[in-house]
Amino acid sequence: MKEKQTKESLDQEFWNSKYENNLTGWDLGEVSPPIKEYIDHLQNKKLKILIPGAGNAYEAKYLIDKGFSNVTVIDIAPRLIDKLKQDFKGNNAIQLIHGDFFEHNGKYDLILEQTFFCAIHPSLRPDYIQKMKSLLSKDGKLCGVLFNREFIGGPPFGGSKEEYLNLIEGRLKVNTIEVCYNSHPARKNTELWINLQKH
């Protein structure tokens, strides 16, 4: 079962079917409130920002509306990327990449985490942390939300603060990992805000 889930978690047809059949229960239909508040406090509009597994890319749209000029989105579902290319047509502030996050190369000042971590099989989490570390520029940050709850089956796959700390510590500096006070009502008390930094 683990092998099947691992494969499905990274299979573009699996995720294509989710979007085509509107099986997107994780989709809030808007910017995640904790991420929105974090973006509102960012001063440097030239930050190089990556959003992996961005889904319908509400966060990317919000960043661009706020004047950020260097946003990259990567997602494994080609039909989703095709849709986003239409949504952002002619906008030079965003780069849209159809591809596998684990094969992506680049350096970013900020990586925003919103329902990507929970979409990959837990067996890939050490690889996720290592890849994030390699993609962050010096002093770059990985910020966003992780689920603070368990799920039956998956994806999504959940976890706890203690579990995440065991995964992160020694690899990235933990500035913050606390229960979100400003989650969307549908996720109240089930999210942790993370602010991690390469050092």
Image (cartoon, grey):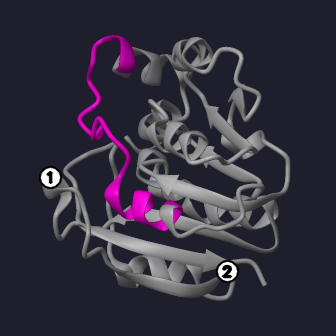
Within 10 angstroms of label 2, few (less than 14), some, or many (20 or more) residues?
many
Examine the image and state in which quarter residue 145 appears: bottom left
The number of callouts visible is: 2
Direction from residue 64 to residue 105 in the image, left or right:
right
Q: Quadrant of the C terminus?
A: bottom right
* Along the line of sight, the residue nearer the viewer: 10 or 79: 79
**Residue visible at 59% across and 16% down?**
78
Mark 1 lies on a secondary structure that is helix
In the rendered image, which residue does mark 2 sit on? 172
Q: Position of residue 36 (x, y in %)?
A: 42, 57
State the separation of the CA atoms marked 1 and 2: 29 Å
Q: Could you say which quadrant of the image residue 72 lies in?
A: top right
Residue 7: x and y in percent read 52, 33
Amino acid type at mark 1? Ala
Vertical placement of 90 versus 153: above or below?
above
The residue drawn where x is 60% and y is 46% is: 51
Q: Position of residue 50 (x, y in %)?
A: 68, 49
Quarter holding the N terminus is top left
Residue range (magenta): 19-39
Residue 117: which numbered mark, if any? none
Residue 186's disc number: 1
> What amino acid type should be assigned to the residue bearing mark 2?
Leu
Callout 2: SS: loop
Q: Is residue 36 magenta?
A: yes
Dividing the picture into quarters, in which one does residue 174 lie?
Answer: bottom right
Say which residue appears at 75% left-offset and 58% top-offset.
47
In this rendered view, identify the residue nearer to me: 112 or 6.
112
In magenta stretch: residue 161: no
